[in-house]
Image: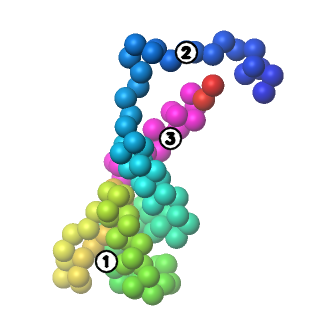
Amino acid sequence: MAAQSLNQPHKRMNTKNPPRLDSCQVGRVAKILHAYTHPFRYEVIKCLLMHGKLSLGELTSYLNVDEAYLSEHVSVLYLNDLVSMEDSADGYSIAANEPRLILIKNSVDAFLANRA
């Protein structure tokens, strides 16, 4: 596989119109991916995708963890727009932000597929 890629012509970046991605954007993307790839937060997202919108208590039961520990991680997911939260009778309910998660997955897939 490596020999094949050495024989393929490499595309050069258009230096007249280079891609514009500033350091703030790169930092933001890094924070989102870091939030998404944390092992426990990934489990939270998987649970929400499987079960739909859940209260904090329900999510605590499914994941068998302390509520304070879970709240800390849900907060990171929320700040990175990976989950949404709504007020409910039980405090608040949490749901995976599926459109955002799909966008992230598709973007990463496209990035990895276009590696030279």
Q: Which mark is residue 55?
A: 1
> Main SS of the magenta segment?
helix
Label 2 crowding class (10 Å Cα cut-off): few <14, some 14-19, many 20+?
few
Q: Nearer the viewer, residue 28 or 109?
A: 28
Disc 2 marks which amino acid? Arg
Circle 2 residue = 12
Neighbor class of circle 3 (other Cα within 10 Å; few <14, some 14-19, many 20+) is: few
Would you say the residues marked 3 and 1 are in contact, meaning their CB atoms lie under 8 Å apart?
no
CB within 8 Å, label 1 to label 2: no
Q: CA distance from mark 3 to mark 2?
A: 21 Å
**Residues rendered magenta in the picture:** 98-114
Mark in the foreground, 3 or 1: 3
- Foreground: disc 1 or disc 2: 2
Above or below — where is 9 with respect to 36?
above
- Describe residue 80's horizontal placement relative to residue 111 as left or right: left
Residue in the picture at 37% in, 78% down: 71
Mark 1 belongs to which amino acid?
Ser
Looking at the image, tell me whether mark 3 or mark 2 is earlier in sequence order.
Answer: 2
Which of 45 and 51 lies nearest the eye of the viewer?
Answer: 45
Q: Quadrant of residue 73?
A: bottom left
